[in-house]
Image (cartoon, rainbow, N blue to C red):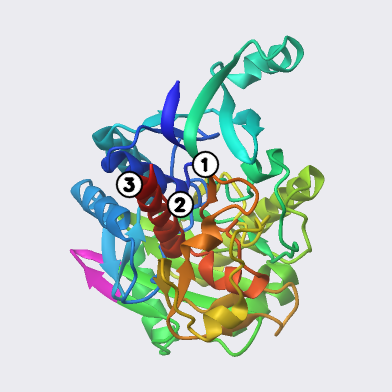
Amino acid sequence: MIYDLAVVGGGTAGCAAAYIGAKYGLKVILIEKNIHLGGTITSGLVVPVMKSGDNQINTEFYNDLITELRKIGGQITYQNNSGWFNPELVKIALDTLMLKVGADVRFKCQVYKIDAKNQHIETLYINDKILSVYNYTIHNENNMLLEPIAAKYVIDSTGNCEIGKILNCKFLENFSQPMSLRFIAGGIDIKTFAKWLEEFDTDRNVTTVEHIEGSIHLSTAYTWDGLWALAPLFEDAVAKNILKPPDCNYFQIFTVAGMSDAIAFNCPRIIENIDQNSVKDVSKALIEARGAIFRLMDFCKIYFPGFENAYISNIADELGIRVSNRIEGKYVYTEDDLKNSKKFENPAVVADYPIDVHSCDKNKGELIKTGEYQLPIEALMSADFDNLFVAGRCLSADYKAQAALRVQASCFSMGEAVAKYIVKNC
């Protein structure tokens, strides 16, 4: 098969790229290793989509996704942020959007081999059989079961730059931040919990409760850095061996659109230094995180009114990874570019989300507000291959700049910007 655009990775950036490319007339294939689209939103349960400024560009896909989610009850606007999504309904909305524009979506599919010549990608080889059955055959019988895909342009939106790794592209210096494993709890009496929470914590910069479209929505947080209203509860739980001290390093909860008795947890945060490329390290992190989830659920049932009948309803299918492999692009975007609000001829992103660096140690994290900044399209172009782009957290940016740009809103814009650039040049 011959395509104008092959998008590898159906997360936030990849979905935006595939949808916009197909909407504007390109023949697009979207290759996703899992059984649904959405990436961090669906597999990672990363909700809400954090607001990233009032002057964002390349938001057509994001707005179309909101429209589709509104139709099926999967979106609300809370705290002046339209990105409060239902992760399960996002799966359905994304399928619908891809069908509308005619993008060819392949689930349970990966790229195993790439033919390239003179710094130009010519053919991707993907599986056309389920690999759990045919993996041995693929690798031992001359790739008989691999399907060749020719594409004029390729976007690596895998998060970890898997296409760049196959092609042996140059990468920037690797760093790490703590990972998280999110979960959702159901069976909660939201009304009772909201009433107690509003009275217990009067700091509206931390805890908010709103009545939206007949439902109560709320959010609150606690970390082991600084002073928080919830601190005495966590300290008491550690003293009574309900929680372990590392369980208290980061705690953040939100209600979920379309789930009247559920709360989403942005925790636990894993404070060990984990190599996200190591199977051994990631396996250990997942086991530790699921143990922490069980303890946190017990904690909530004991200390939070309204949680008496709560239960764990969903644990994320993948770790929340904040930084991973980053390709060296035609332009390497820097912390100074971001802080100085450097302007570019072809911006892909306009945002103001702060530099957000999580730490494994107390009082070592950073949250630096910088004002509005632009990311150039050249930071999404491979320096090694003329028809390879990246979109998402694997962009060409230094560590601190990436820590501001890794959020979902900016990833949506990156994917859309690359697709629109390709539409103009295809």
Amino acid type, residue under disc 3 in the picture? Ile
Kind of residue at disc 2: Ala
How many angstroms separate mark 3 from mark 1 (CA)? 15 Å
Q: Which residue is mark 1?
A: 9
Which quadrant is the N terminus positioned in? top left
Between 362 and 7, the one nearer to me in the picture: 7
Q: Is residue 214 magenta?
A: yes
What range of the chain is rendered magenta? Answer: 210-216
Crowd rating for badge 1 (residues with CA inside 10 Å; few <14, some 14–19, many 20+): many
Where residue 264 appears, as percent x and y from the top left, is: 46, 59
Circles 3 and 1: CB atoms closer than 8 Å: no
Q: CA distance from mark 1 to mark 2?
A: 8 Å
Q: Write the residue at 53% across / 18% down.
A: 128
Which residue, as the protein is rendered here, is positioned at the far right?
280
Residue 361 sits above or below residue 104 on the image: below
Q: Can the viewer see residue 114 in this picture?
A: yes
Q: Quadrant of the C terminus?
A: top left
Relative vertical location of residue 251 with respect to residue 150 in this rendering, above or below: below
- What residue sits right under mark 2 in the picture? 13
In whole angstroms, how far apart are the C-alphas of marks 3 and 2?
11 Å
Which residue: 52% across, 61% down? 378
* Element class at badge 3: helix
Q: How many marks?
A: 3
Q: What residue does disc 3 label?
A: 20
Q: Nearer the viewer, mark 3 or mark 1?
A: 3
Q: Comparing marks 3 and 2, which lies closer to the viewer?
A: 3
Disc 3: CA contacts within 10 A as few (<14), some (14-19) or many (>=20): many
Residue 305 occupies quadrant? bottom left
Element class at badge 2: helix
Tell me where residue 129 appears, x and y as whole percent: 56, 16
